Amino acid sequence: MTELELLIDFHKNAERQGPGSTADTLRALSFIDLEQSRPLKVADIGCGSGAQTITLAQNSEGHITAVDLFPEFLDRLKQKSASQDLQDKITTLEASMDNLPFGPEEYDIIWSEGAIYNIGFEAGIKKWKDFLKPGGYLALSEITWITNSRPREIEEHWNTEYPEIGTASGKIRILEKNGFSPVGYFYLPQSSWIDTYYKPMEERFEDFLIRHGNSEAAMRIVDAEKDEIRKYRKYKDYFSYGFYVAKKLPEE
Ligand code: SAH
């Protein structure tokens, strides 16, 4: 198995592939004020195994196109949506977020939790904007500094991992600069990292290592996750995922 296949194998049976919770998804959804006289068209980009897709399907009158690069995650989502009788509300689509087969102004809502970093926050906003109707909404979660300054170790770590990390004011500025009106911001509470993401992940370590005969590559993945958890626990007062909800303005 390649490193990528191992990573997919590690994450595919998880409820979620990043920090978040049902409450966070619903909180972000509460900022969206759209006429529901017709079914809304929603895209959920980088959906993973679809924890938030299911929440969206259960709590909105719309059809969701759930996109991910990896079919293993989409298969899990398909199983979940069938078991909850939501298959008519969710279509899965295997595609890359930088090359989406969407038409101009096709969607009412573009949702993306913990995934836009794969192409970068600003590049993603610019690319996805065309697919949104004027007056449509973008809802994104993105790694964010939650204080104005922070210890050097964590600053250097994130600047290496993801130089686009910034504060909420900077992210909101980017939305404004690109023709959006921000309507909501909050950041994920610690429980959305620890209880719904890291704890279930820690419970999978042993099984994963056994399944792969304690191979070096499997151990590297577990060690990297452990290191990430350590950094989170140490520096959780300085960063989180910010959730940004913004409305697309009509073109000037
Ligand atoms: N939204 C989910 C998953 C977040 S993890 C959750 O919050 O649980 C990021 C997801 O982005 C992964 O499922 C990964 O497979 C997907 N991804 C990574 N690069 C991608 C790309 N280029 N196009 C589409 N999806 C991608």
Image: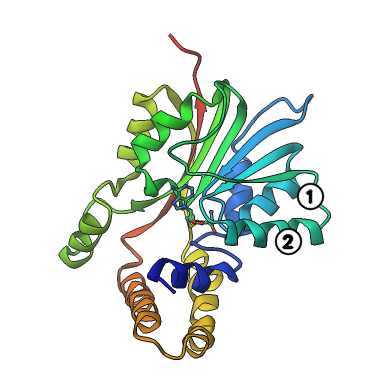
Q: Amino acid at mark 2?
A: Lys
Residue 23: image x %, image y %?
Answer: 62, 56
Q: Which residue is mark 1?
A: 87
Q: Earlier in the sequence, mark 1 or mark 2?
A: 2
Q: Residue at x 39, y 87 (%)?
A: 215
Q: Nearer the viewer, residue 86 or 96?
A: 96
Q: Quadrant of the N terminus?
A: bottom left
Quarter of the rendering containing residue 4? bottom left
Q: Amino acid at mark 1?
A: Gln
Residue 60: image x %, image y %?
Answer: 73, 41
Q: Residue at x 55, y 26 (%)?
A: 132
Residue 111: image x %, image y %?
Answer: 56, 41
Q: Nearer the viewer, residue 106 or 38?
A: 106
Q: Are the residues tagged 1 and 2 within 8 Å (C-beta)?
A: no
Label 2 CB-ligand 1 distance < 8 A: no
83 lies above or below 211: above
151 lies above or below 176: below
Q: Quadrant of the C terminus?
A: top left
Q: Give the CA separation, mark 1 to mark 2.
A: 9 Å
Q: Nearer the viewer, residue 218 or 168?
A: 218
Query: Which residue, as the protein is rendered here, is positioned at the far top?
Result: 252
Quarter of the rendering containing residue 121? top left
Q: Which residue is mark 2?
A: 80
